[in-house]
Amino acid sequence: MDLAVPSPEPPSTQHSPENGRAPHSAANEPGLRRHRLVVSSTYEAEPIGPGRYGPPQVVKAERTAVVGRPDQDHISTSYIERQNLTMQMSMRRFTRLTNAFSKKVENLRVAVALHFAHYNFVRLHRTLRMTPAMTAGVSDRMWSIEELVEQTSR
């Protein structure tokens, strides 16, 4: 599983090994950090015979830094799994057996961009008591829906 995690280290200027291209330009902006790692899990062999039905036990999990130097204390699949669940619950087009799918890739791209813009700039997060954009210092206030629509219609 490929994860992006927070870390106090400066952004990496290396090329990304997974695609051979330089990291996205936003990742190189001052104050933003980019680190990428891979968590590989090894599972026990499935038991043979009747009696057990369920997920196999994890035998080993290896964490490998791909870009930058991620903080070992923040390496966890919980962050990305929570983000995936939030995205699925907010946009039904990512769940199975739904009629809210995107027929065009461009429509999907716009829907995902609007979700993350709303999530980061408009939505108040209870644990943070502010928006993620305010926490990161990208914005000094919560945006209204009207401001989001105005910014995205330019």
Image (cartoon, rainbow, N blue to C red):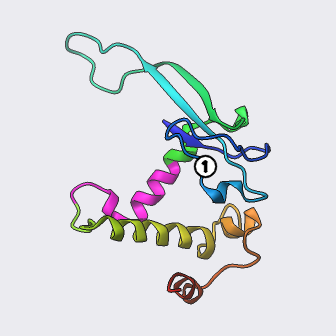
Task: Pick whichever, 54 or 106, lies toward us.
Answer: 106
Residue under numbered circle 1: 23
Most extreme residue toward the top, as rendered? Answer: 48
Q: Residue at x 24, y 16 (%)?
A: 51
* Mark 1, secondary structure of its residue: loop
Range drawn in magenta: 82-97
Question: Residue 97, relative to residue 6: is it above or below?
Answer: below
Please provide percent x and percent y for residue 140: 77, 76
| Left/right of residue 99 with respect to residue 148 in the rendered view | left
Q: Is residue 121 magenta?
A: no
Please provide percent x and percent y for residue 5: 64, 44
Question: Residue 63, relative to residue 26: is it above or below?
Answer: above
Q: Residue at x 55, y 35 (%)?
A: 17
Question: Residue 113, relative to residue 40: is it above or below?
Answer: below
Q: Residue at x 31, y 56 (%)?
A: 95
Q: Within the image, what quadrant is residue 133 found in?
A: bottom right
